[in-house]
Amino acid sequence: MISRKLAVASLAALSFAATAQQPAPAPSFKGKVKPGLYEQKVDVDMGNMPGVPPDQKKQTTTRQQCLTEAEVDKLAEECNPACKTTDFRMTATDASFKVACSGNPPMTSVVTMAFTATGYVTESKATLKPPGAAEAVTVSQRATSKFLGPCPAKAPAPAPAPAPKK
């Protein structure tokens, strides 16, 4: 049986791969994903992950993420040196690719993205074999990213406090 800590680490690796979108090394999502503020709802199904209580196998989180033009350009770069992206395909409405990550445990993932007028949806299915597990584990994730508008203006840095008088 694997530890809950390994299960969370494996989930984090999958979440990073799919949410940070490590697509192909060359193509860009410019024109497919626009810069701005997104609300991202992530549904995760840890499937047959040992050590995770049944009531925690399916989880949903929601967060907001702001993507700048530069970050949209970087969506097509490898974010983790232990991972390699292959079989990248992109059309006007979707993209698909595979990600293989070395490490302990190694992981492979099949990822699809659908571009919509209001954002994009990323689905991934990762397979890994944790140490001590009798069989491979499958973890699935669906992230729905809805465009909310421009990124909020950053608050100016506070002015430094005046030096004390002597």
Image (cartoon, rainbow, N blue to C red):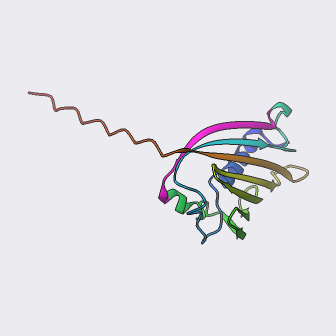
| Corner quadrant of residue 72 | bottom right
Task: Give the total number of marks visible in the rendering.
Answer: 0
Q: Is residue 107 visible?
A: no
Q: Residue at image x 73%, y 64%? A: 96
Observer-nearest residue: 115 or 104? Answer: 115
Residue 66: within the magenta? Answer: yes
Q: Is 59 drawn above or below residue 133 in the view shown?
A: above
Q: Residue at image x 65%, y 37%? A: 62
**As drawn, is 99 to the left or to the right of 135?**
left
Q: Position of residue 149 (x, y in %)?
A: 52, 44
Q: Position of residue 137 (x, y in %)?
A: 85, 50
Q: Is 33 drawn above or below residue 163 in the view shown?
A: below
Q: Residue at image x 48%, y 46%? A: 150
Is the N terminus in the top left, top right, bottom left or bottom right quadrant?
A: top right
Q: Position of residue 130 (x, y in %)?
A: 81, 51
**Residue furthest left as drawn:** 166
Is the C terminus in the top left, top right, bottom left or bottom right quadrant?
A: top left
**Residue furthest front as drawn:** 117
> Which region is colored magenta?
56-70
Observer-nearest residue: 4 or 61? Answer: 61
Q: Is residue 92 visible?
A: yes
Q: Residue at image x 33%, y 40%? A: 156
Q: Is 65 drawn above or below residue 89 in the view shown?
A: above
| Corner quadrant of residue 32 | bottom right
- Main SS, magenta region, reads strand
**As drawn, is 17 to the left or to the right of 52?**
left
Q: Is 16 drawn above or below residue 50 in the view shown?
A: below
**As drawn, is 90 to the left or to the right of 166?**
right
Residue 65: within the magenta? Answer: yes
